[in-house]
Image (cartoon, rainbow, N blue to C red):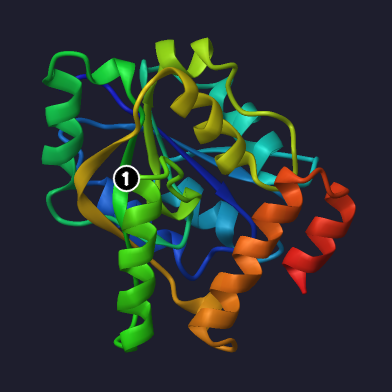
Amino acid sequence: MAGLTVLIPTLNEAARLPLLLADLARWHTQAQIVVIDAGSVDATRTVATLAGAEVLICSEAGRGQQLILGMARRRHDWILVLHADSRLPERWTDAVGAVQRGPGGDRHGWYFDFRVEGERPMLRLLERAVALRSSCGQRPYGDQGLLIHNSLYTAVGGYKAIPLMEDLDLVQRMAQSSRLRRLGCPLTTSNRRWRHRSVLKQAWRNAHLRWRWRRGAPLDALISDYNN
C-alpha cells in the first residue's frame, strides 16, 4: 500500500483524540499523522505528541485555516482528513488500501458512511438521510472523513481559508469535476451535538446554516449561530 498522511484539526479534544490515534495505529506502516491545533487549553497537544503525531499550532481560528496549514506539511500523495471525535472501523485499512491500489482511485474523493454513537432511533434515520445526501447529492459531511489524492486536491484548488463550511466548499468543487464515492465502511462520530437537542432540531439547524451560507450570509453571523 502507498503512504498515507492523516490530518486532524483539533480544539480541546484530549478526551476523544486518544481513541482515534489508537485506530490509526492499525495502518500497515507508520502513517504521517498531523494534528493541527487551534489553541487547546487541555492536554490535546500532549496526547498527540505522546502518540508520535506531528503537532502544528494554528493561530487563526477555523478548520479551513487549520487544514491549509496541515496540507502544507503532507509528505504523501494520499491524504485522509478526519475529525478528532471520530472512530475508525476495524477494516478501515482494507478499504483505504483498496482505493490506493485500484485503477482510477486518485480521480475521486472518498468518504466513509456516517454513523453516530448511541441507540436512539432518530439517529438511525439521520444516518440514512445522510447516506442519501452523500450518494445522490454528492455532499458528504466532514464527519464522514475525506480520502483524497494530492493530484485531485490540487486540481480543485484545495481548502479555502474560511472558518466554517470548509468541508462543504471543497466537496462542492470536487463534485463539479469528479464523483465522490463511498469507502464502504462506517466512521463513527460522537453524539455530543445531539445530547442537548433533538435530532430533528439539530438537523434542521445544520441545514439552515448551510442554506444561509450558500445564500452568502456573513460568516461572522454564521459562526455565532453555529457556536450557540
Residue 117: image quadrant is: bottom left
> Residue at 88% across / 48% down in the picture?
218
> Which element type, helix, strand or loop, lies under badge 1?
helix
- Up the image or down, 225 lies above or below 69; here it is below
Asked whether residue 97 is in view, the answer is: yes
Residues 70 and 50: in front is 70
Please state if 69 lies on the left or on the right of 100 as rendered: right
Please state if 201 lies on the left or on the right of 92 as rendered: right
Residue 156: image quadrant is: top right
Quickly name the residue at label 1. 135
Residue 84 lies, in percent from the top left, at 48, 56
Residue 109: image quadrant is: top left
Asked whether residue 56 is in view, the answer is: no
- Up the image or down, 177 lies above or below 172; here it is above
| Amino acid of disc 1 | Ser
Quadrant where the N terminus is found in the figure:
top left
Residue 169 lies, in percent from the top left, at 61, 36
Residues 11 and 110: in front is 110
> Residue at 50% across / 34% down in the picture?
171
Residues 117 and 199: in front is 199
